[in-house]
Amino acid sequence: MGTGHIMRCLALAEGLRDLGHECHFLLAEGISSIEQRVAAEGVVLSHIGDPTQDAAAEATCRYAASIDARGIIVDGYQFSARWREHLRGIGRPVLSFYDYAPEGALAADIVLCPSLDVAEPAIRQATAGALWLCGPAYVLLRRDLRRALAEPPLPWSERRSLLVTFGGSDPMGLTRPVVLGLAHPPLPGTRIEVVIGGGVRDREGLACELSRLCPGIVVHVNAPNLGTLMRQAGLAVSAAGTTVGELAAFGVPSAIVVVADNQVEGARQAAAKGWCRMLDERVSPSARTVIDLARQLWADVKGRGAMALSASSAIDGHGVTRVCDALMGTTARAGTVLAAS
């Protein structure tokens, strides 16, 4: 899975810690740079085996009991229905993210899906009694993004940078060809900000290569200032997923590239709202298609302005507070919260 799953859990962990709760992350596997980021926020990190196995479900329950967890956040579409039922059986409230996977919302007290306005009737029936948190009001922004969003908005005329980010690992390898295609021929008066995630293979080598292309390219590895980069961007070329809501919060018109089945519906709804243009690259990813769309959007200043207005008016940045309030409403007292991913 993408590192966006870890980042949205981190956003909730930050909000919960601000309320005085201790947070633990229980991971099946991880990336060292991402784990360092999580640990830096004061979150306790532990690892477990394959989470789809009964033994791992039992181990997760034992871990939750050992820290006296008052709530459990489950993020991952690889968790089976049996795993989820086992976890819920220990009597602690469960919040589950829903990513359009059939079993993704089962056995939960709260179901969270910011990219979906209203849950499908069949899924709601399968989760009878669960509280659904749907829509842009529940988009989760990490603390660094919320701080950048609180700054006075940058005038549209001053947004001269084009942001390129294909997630924490860029599984389709689109960063290099897309940046090359945007750099040659150059876009006059444009700075290209490239964000390379901690899970990208040979990220340091890629960063060196792209930095040498031309003076107008600035490369960031693990970008601790992502909120500032979004705030300054006049256009983003991005993978689909959690980044879509983050870009919308900053009013960044975007070309969104879908590379996984569970990203399709969320990207379609964002495009229908006018936040972005969507490209479905699941079967045969084409950097040329992405480059052509990005150049077309960059040339359409009026169109980008309309997209920016539509996006920024939908998200107020308080999603973390709303979700934390909902989760705390299901717990008896302040305590420890466990996130399993």
Image (tube, helix red, strand yellow):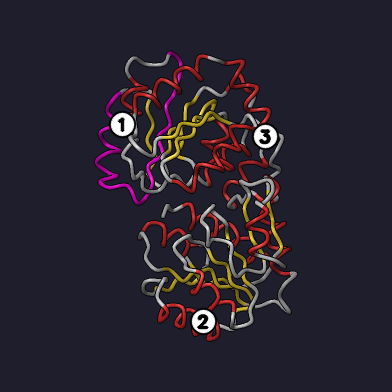
| Left/right of residue 166 with respect to residue 111 in the rendered view | left
Circle 3 is placed at which residue position?
312
Residue at 34 percent of width and 51 percent of height? 199
State if disc 2 and disc 1 touch (CB < 8 Å): no
Of callouts 3 and 1, the N-terminal one: 1
The residue type indicated by label 1 comes to Ser
Residue 61: give its label. 2
Element type where label 3 sits in the image: helix
- Judging depth in this view, the residue of 126 and 253 nearest the camera is 126
The residue type indicated by label 2 comes to Cys
Mark nearer the viewer, 1 or 2: 2
Q: Quadrant of the N terminus?
A: bottom left
Above or below, 98 relative to 246: below
Above or below, 50 relative to 35: below
Measured in 3D between alpha carbons, the distance from the residue under mark 3 to the one under mark 1, in whole angstroms, is 31 Å
Q: How many marks?
A: 3
Residue 252, how many percent across, how many down? 58, 31
Of callouts 2 and 3, the N-terminal one: 2
Residue at 58 percent of width and 62 percent of height? 105
Measured in 3D between alpha carbons, the distance from the residue under mark 1 to the one under mark 2, in whole angstroms, is 47 Å
Measured in 3D between alpha carbons, the distance from the residue under mark 2 to the one under mark 3, in whole angstroms, is 40 Å
- Judging depth in this view, the residue of 164 and 120 nearest the camera is 120
The residue type indicated by label 3 comes to Ser
Q: Quadrant of residue 153?
A: top right
Element type where label 2 sits in the image: helix
Q: Quadrant of residue 220?
A: top left
Does the magenta-highlighted stretch encompass residue 195? Answer: yes
Residue 123, how many percent across, how many down? 63, 58
Which span of residues is magenta-colored? 188-213
Residue 30, how many percent across, how many down? 37, 62
Circle 1 is placed at which residue position?
211
